Image (tube, rainbow, N blue to C red):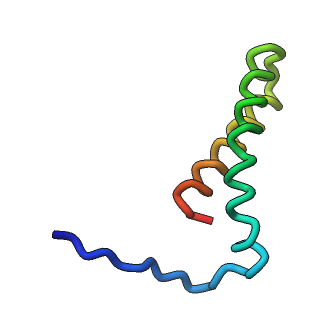
Amino acid sequence: MTKITKRFSPKPLPAWWKRWRLPCQAVIIPICAFQAVRLFIWPSTLDVLLLGILVGVAVALYFEWI
């Protein structure tokens, strides 16, 4: 059986970020979907980079890395 422990964070998150994390999680997936559709219609290097950044932010928000 594994012991569930709370992760230690050397710096606590600011209060405004705690309030905005959930709305950011709700908005990032539709933005990623829109960017993916845009990438398939008009592919460009900027679109690929932007989609990569957005997916990275979405994963970080989902796993609560930020």
For the N terminus, the image quarter is: bottom left
> Could you tell whether 8 is left or right of 66 in the image?
left
Please indicate whether residue 45 sits to the left or right of residue 8 in the image. right
- Residue at position x 75%, y 21% from top? 37
User: Outermost residue, top direction?
Assistant: 41
Please tell me which residue lies in front, 47 or 29. 29
Q: Name the quadrant containing residue 53.
A: top right
Q: Position of residue 21 (x, y in %)?
A: 70, 64
Residue nearest the viewer, comparing 27 with 54: 27
* Vertical arrangement, residue 49 with respect to residue 26, above or below: above
Q: Position of residue 54 (x, y in %)?
A: 71, 43
Residue 14 horizontal/vertical position (percent) = 73, 81
Q: Is residue 21 above or below residue 52?
A: below
Locate residue 51, reporting x and y percent: 72, 35
The residue lying at 73 percent from left, 56 percent from top is 24
Q: Which residue is at 70% across, 50% downward? A: 26
Q: Classify 30 as above or below 15.
A: above
**Quick one: which residue is furthest to the left in this view?**
1
Residue visible at 63% across and 47% down?
56
